Amino acid sequence: CQALADIVITIDASGSIGPKNYKKVQQFTVDIAKSFRIGKNEVQFGSVIFSSVAQKWFDLKDNRNIAQLRRALLSAPYLNSTTRTDKALDLIRSENMFGRSAGGRDAAQKIVILLTDGASDDKKKTLTAANKLKNNDVNIIAVGVGNAELAELRAVASSNDDVLFANTFDALDKVKDQVIERTCENILNVTVVMF
């Protein structure tokens, strides 16, 4: 879909994923990004990676085409520790990743795509952080893999429709189109039917 959107891909880089599966997650994020027209007047992507700490990987304004974006996503380091989802969501807000200084645009839809494979270490803080983002007009799409906790993903996501699930990392490819479709629905605020 062609539209104005600022999307922050938030990637779980915790120990339970493992380096081999982390590469699959990285490729999944690239495949999602490739489905959109990237540009200053179209869709922009930022990224956060998290484990025991959260790290802003790049801002919305940092990668102006798919080649740059692909390089950046594939080079995100694997942190290999715990799952502090709350720190990632808090970082998006505290670093003002949707703000003008980061490349954010007032008229753009603000979307977080959260990818995780397990329950967060602090559910209460995670829900508080998610609610603060949602109260600032940020839509959260939660993508769970394997042992991800569905109830928590539902609480974090903007709606039940914004929760997508893959049983294994190999099955991520099967939910890719659903993630893209749901992202488009959030951007355009309509129901999209993909054929």
Image: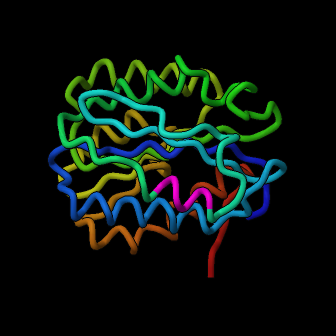
The residue sitting at 42% across, 68% down in the picture is 175
Q: Is 21 placed above or below 4 here?
A: below
Quadrant housing the C terminus? bottom right
The reply, left or right, for residue 59 in relation to residue 23 is right
Q: Main secondary structure of the magenta part?
A: helix
Viewer-nearest residue: 106 or 63: 63
The residue sitting at 51% across, 63% down in the picture is 30
Range covered by the magenta-colored residues: 68-73
* Residue 155 drawn in magenta: no
Q: Where residue 25 sits in the image (x, y, percent)? A: 35, 60
Q: Where residue 16 sits in the image (x, y, percent)? A: 15, 48
Q: Where residue 63 sits in the image (x, y, percent)? A: 66, 50
The reply, left or right, for residue 5 in relation to residue 194 is right
Q: How is the image coloured?
A: rainbow
The residue sitting at 40% across, 18% down in the picture is 128
The reply, left or right, for residue 54 in relation to residue 140 is left
The residue sitting at 67% across, 60% down in the picture is 191
Q: Is 71 placed above or below 83 here?
A: below
Q: Is 127 placed above or below 159 here?
A: above
Q: Where residue 26 sits in the image (x, y, percent)? A: 40, 59
Residue 130's quadrant in the figure?
A: top left
